[in-house]
Image: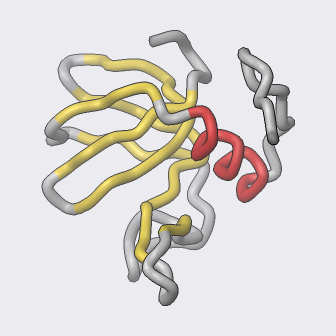
Amino acid sequence: MEINDIVSVVATSGEYIGKYKGVEDGSLTLEDPRMIIRADDGGMGFARGIAVTGEENPTSVTFNNYVFVVPTNEKIAGHYQEATGSIVTPPKTPTIIT
């Protein structure tokens, strides 16, 4: 993973998405983090933060305990970029709609 890649983090408290900032002494830092939440229609969405009682739209979060971190699916990464106001870049491979 490279700095600023959009990654998904699974922790015992839930699943999160954000821009990878690195790992130091086993602690993982994300910028513009969002918690993944279940939508009423059964889909998914992004919370405006990472904790119910935490500040809205935090600029970063550091995980001291996490299960794993993986690159985020391109479609979900695009939705994340839209939700956070990040610059949206075209997918690496073209999407063909029939």
Report whether 76 appears left or right of 82. left
Q: Residue furthest bottom?
A: 40
Q: Could you tell me residue 58's position as x and y percent?
A: 57, 58
Q: Could you tell me residue 23's position as x and y percent?
A: 33, 19
Task: Give the color scheme: rainbow, by chain, secondary structure or one colour.
Answer: secondary structure
Q: Quadrant of the C terminus?
A: top right
Q: Residue at x 15, y 41 (%)?
A: 65
Q: Residue furthest top?
A: 2
Name the quadrant containing residue 56. bottom right
Total of numbered circles in the picture?
A: 0
Report whether 40 appears left or right of 59. left
- Between residues 50 and 46, which one lies in front from this camera angle? 46
Report whether 60 appears left or right of 79. left
Q: Residue at x 73, y 17 (%)?
A: 93
Q: Quadrant of the N terminus?
A: top left
Name the quadrant containing residue 70. top left
Name the quadrant containing residue 28. top left
Q: Residue at x 58, y 46 (%)?
A: 76
Is 51 drawn above or below residue 52 in the view shown? above
Is 52 drawn above or below residue 29 in the view shown? below
- Between residues 68 and 92, which one lies in front from this camera angle? 92
Q: Residue at x 14, y 38 (%)?
A: 67
Q: Could you tell me residue 64's position as x and y percent?
A: 20, 39
